[in-house]
């Protein structure tokens, strides 16, 4: 068993059954190369943790804010999406403790690693819930996840990039952005779209994605950065 004392210190949690924490860090790919490893992969713990995080965040938002359901739904989505959870996982050094196949271990700054990290965080939450119950898990999720809500609201990160860029453009220059497909390459099952975002005839930025919607969001995000909006 790996020495997880340092990780427990970073998490601010001491597990009664450390094997639960260790299992939360085991990606399926590791077992393909190490079939005799003593523990299973983390997918069942991830399944549990996903539901526990959503319940804790939902209960907090419901109890704390009188806002309409639609707004609370957007706020919750901004807290529990894969990008946010992977950032939290990275800040807690989960990257250093993951059990991965040699191939997966080489893929560091990729979308696949982002999902692996997010899933590992959910699995850690599931493991903590199994180890210590709801109260301890709620304290951990409040400290690591819900604590990010003020920053999200201040910077309007609960809005998707297209909505944020449209609001900023209308407010600052009185123009509604438009989007155009600049290129479309690859076979049908693996297309890559490059989308340009325009203010009148000015191309502000471009972005790529596996769908037009994804490309538009990437372009809008790039435009927000370009304009410092």
Image (tube, rainbow, N blue to C red):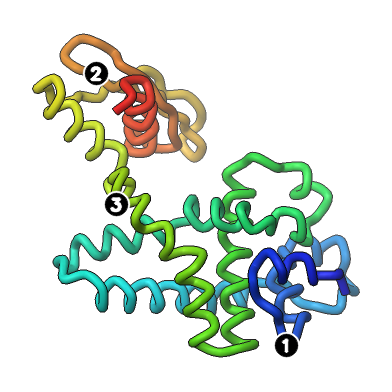
User: Real-space Cα distance between discs 2 and 1?
Assistant: 56 Å
Residue occupying image coordinates x 20% and y 24%: 178
Mark 2 residue crowding within 10 angstroms, few (<14) / some (14–19) / many (20+): many
Residue most extreme to the right: 36
Q: In front: mark 2 or mark 3?
A: 3
SS for dot 2 = strand
* Residue 24: quarter of image: bottom right
SS for dot 1 = loop
| Residue 110 located left or right of residue 66 | right
Residue occupying image coordinates x 45% and y 71%: 142
Disc with the residue nearer the chain's start (2 vs 3): 3
**Residue under label 1:** 16
User: Real-space Cα distance between discs 2 and 3?
Assistant: 26 Å
Disc with the residue nearer the chain's start (3 vs 1): 1
| Residue 144 located left or right of residue 127 | left
Q: Which numbered dot is residue 198?
A: 2
Q: Nearer the viewer, residue 10 or 102?
A: 10
**Percent position of residue 193, x then y:** 41, 28
Q: Nearer the viewer, residue 157 or 140?
A: 140
**Residue under label 3:** 153
SS for dot 3 = helix
Residue occupying image coordinates x 28% and y 45%: 156
Tell me the quadrant of the picture where the C terminus can be found. top left
């Amino acid at each position: 068993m790996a020495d997880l004392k340092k990780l427990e210190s970073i998490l601010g949690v001491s597990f009664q059954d450390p094997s639960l924490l260790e299992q939360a860090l085991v990606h399926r790919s590791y077992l393909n190369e190490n079939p005799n490893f003593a523990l299973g992969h983390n997918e069942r713990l991830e399944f549990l943790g996903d539901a526990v995080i959503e319940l804790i965040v939902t209960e907090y938002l419901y109890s704390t804010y009188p806002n309409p359901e639609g707004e609370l739904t957007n706020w919750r989505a901004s807290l529990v999406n894969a990008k946010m959870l992977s950032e939290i996982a990275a800040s807690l050094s989960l990257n250093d403790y993951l059990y991965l196949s040699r191939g997966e271990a080489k893929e560091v700054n990729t979308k696949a690693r982002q999902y692996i990290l997010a899933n590992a965080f959910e699995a850690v939450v599931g493991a903590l819930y199994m180890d210590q119950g709801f109260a301890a898990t709620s304290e951990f999720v409040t400290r690591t996840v819900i604590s990010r809500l003020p920053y999200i609201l201040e910077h309007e990160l609960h809005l998707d990039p297209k909505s944020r860029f449209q609001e900023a453009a209308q407010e600052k220059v009185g123009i509604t952005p438009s989007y155009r497909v600049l290129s479309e390459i690859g076979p049908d099952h693996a297309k890559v779209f490059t989308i340009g975002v325009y203010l009148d005839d000015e191309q502000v930025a471009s972005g790529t994605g596996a769908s037009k919607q994804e490309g538009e969001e990437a372009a809008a995000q790039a435009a927000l950065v370009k304009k410092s909006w």
